[in-house]
Image: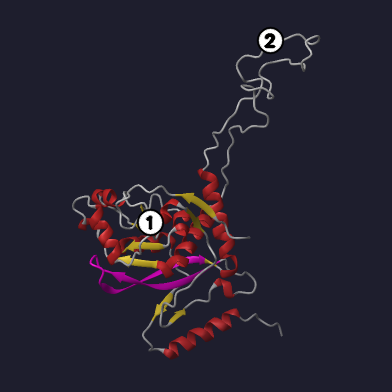
Amino acid sequence: MASTTAGVALPLTSSSSSLASPLSHSTTNASFSGLKVVPSLKRASVKKALQCQSAAKPGKVVAMAVTLPMLTFEGEAAGEVEMDLRTARPETAKAVVHRGVICEMQNRRRGTASTLTRSEVRGGGRKPYKQKGTGRARQGSIRTPLRPGGGVVFGPKPKDWSIKINKKEKRLAISTALQSASVNTVVVEDFEDKFTTPKTKEFISALKRWGVKQGENSLLFSVNPSESLVLSSRNVSTVKLITPRNLNLYDVLRADKLILTKSSVEYLEQMYGASGSFEIIVGDGEGEEEDSAIEEASEEAVEPETSS
């Protein structure tokens, strides 16, 4: 299934913002070109054989752990944070994300567009003039679609555009998009209490310290944003602040830069993280004997039994 491209025009709400650019007036595209993986862990081994290794029942999800850089509020390096989310298999990731964004955009439609037919327009019950003898074309009503003020032929009527999608499939699409966006993701220590008063200038300065370039569409995900943070960020047209309540697939795909807080990473791992059957061990280079034993056990579990 082909990837989806949807465009939304973003009005520039603040001409004084240093992050605002002429690109804000143009159409912004949201697309998903496939699953991207960041070289993350030095050594990661799976204790139990993944379901996708079974020839009888191939798995639909995989576990991929990535390492994200973490910054302080001042923009200095503060280590790394690991994020492990459930993702669709590479050969089906594009189809899952495509279906998720299509359902999301369709369900946003209110479907309230409505027009009046010739029978619903007020008036037109009397024949405007007699059938014959006038030399004009015959008319039975002044509300015919051929005349101004008449009804509309085949016009829109209220319609339900919603599409059903399974809850697990929707969550898998979001987690796959988040994991794919990890190449453009940065984690910042919890800074909700840093903004004591609403100051857009201070918020823009913080974005520059975090590596957000001018004109980049950024998505800031915070679990519990303060009122001052909301007021400081809402006047910047290229930045959108979301919470777990309004986390959606389209905003993740549309963003050029994804900014997460440390608490938001913990929330994402709790809601969209890998299940207990995918246990990943992170090491520093020791314990090769244990790894070889695990790999041999996995191969034995995958090999089919031969009948004697």
Q: Residues within 10 Å of mark 1 (few under 14, many from 20)?
A: some
63 inside magenta stretch: yes
Q: Which mark is residue 21?
A: 1
Quadrant containing the C terminus in the rendered view: bottom right
The amino acid on which the numbered mark 2 sits, given as a three-letter code, is: Arg
What residue occupies the far left of the structure in this picture? 196
Q: In the rendering, which numbered label is found on residue 126? A: 2
- Residue found at x 54% / y 67%: 34
| Residue that appears at 41% across and 79% down | 41
Residue 113 is left or right of residue 275, and the answer is: right
- For the question of whether residue 274 can be seen, the reply is no
Q: Who is closer to the viewer here, 256 or 72?
A: 256
Q: Position of residue 39 (x, y in %)?
A: 44, 78
In the rendered image, which quarter is residue 117 located in?
top right
First reached walking from the N terminus: tag 1 or tag 2: 1
- Where's residue 78, x and y in %? 26, 73
Classify 57 as above or below 114: below
Q: Is residue 84 left or right of residue 145?
A: left
Q: What residue span does the magenta drawing correspond to?
A: 61-87
